[in-house]
Each structure stands twice: as C-alpha cells, then as structure tokens.
Amino acid sequence: MVQLQTRIDQLTKLNADHHRRASLTRRQAQQLIEDKAELQALLHDRDQEIARIRDRLKRYSRDAASDALASKVLLLCLFRKIYYT
C-alpha cells in the first residue's frame, strides 16, 4: 500500500511538471508568433520605404540625368535614413 501511494505521488509530481513545461512551451510559442508578426510588419514597412526611395531616385534620375553624382548622394542619404533610424 505504501508503494502504491509512493508511485501515485511520483506520477502526480511528474504530471505537474509536464503541465508546467507544456504551459511554458505554449507561452514561448505564442511569444515567438508575436515576435514574428512584428518583424514581418517591420520588414513590410522597410520594403515599402525602399520602393518609395527607388521611385524617387528614378524621378530624380530622369530630371537630372546629367548629374549622376547627385543621384548617388541622394540614394546614400535616403538609405542611411532608413537603416540608421
């Protein structure tokens, strides 16, 4: 009878540990899903900003085709603005 109670106590502890670990894993998975969504939104925003910069650069290139250096400087400044802010 003592052995049976000991075994029940062991299984109860194992079950509690399993539930604790499963709960922790669920919380971690949920946090990873949230982090992924935030990163995807940030990437989408950056992609849109890069597309706007490319369009702006094309317009500037058409308007000032003879001034290649100005276009390069503009591009450098715009990319620095995106990646260093």
Image: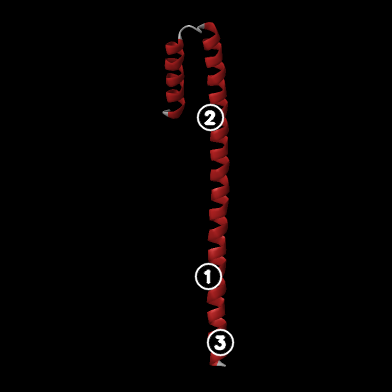
Which residue sits furthest bottom? 1
What x and y, as percent, mark residue 71? 46, 14
Q: CA distance from mark 1 to mark 3?
A: 18 Å
Residue placed under numbered mark 2 in the picture: 46
> Does residue 83 appear left or right of residue 26 in this picture?
left
Q: CA distance from mark 2 to mark 1?
A: 43 Å
Q: Quadrant of the N terminus?
A: bottom right
Dots 1 and 3: beta carbons under 8 Å?
Answer: no
Tag 1, which secondary structure?
helix
Q: CA distance from mark 2 to mark 3?
A: 61 Å
> Which badge, 1 or 3, comes first in the chain's sequence?
3
As drawn, 13 above or below 59: below
Callout 3, which amino acid?
Gln
> Which badge, 2 or 1, comes first in the chain's sequence?
1
Nearer the observer: mark 2 or 3; the answer is 2
Callout 1, which amino acid?
Asp
Residue at image location 58% in from the left, 41% down from the top: 37
Instruction: Please tell me how crowded label 3 is: few (under 14), some (14-19), or many (20+) other residues with Cα within 10 Å.
Output: few
Please identify the quarter of the rendering in which residue 19 is found: bottom right
Residue placed under numbered mark 1 in the picture: 17
As drawn, 37 above or below 11: above
Residue at image location 56% in from the left, 29% down from the top: 47
Residue in front for this viewpoint, 39 or 74:
74
Residue at image location 56% in from the left, 61% down from the top: 23
Residue placed under numbered mark 3 in the picture: 5
Callout 2, which amino acid?
Arg
Please identify the quarter of the rendering in which residue 81 is found: top left
> Does residue 56 appear left or right of residue 73 in this picture?
right
Nearer the observer: mark 2 or 1; the answer is 2
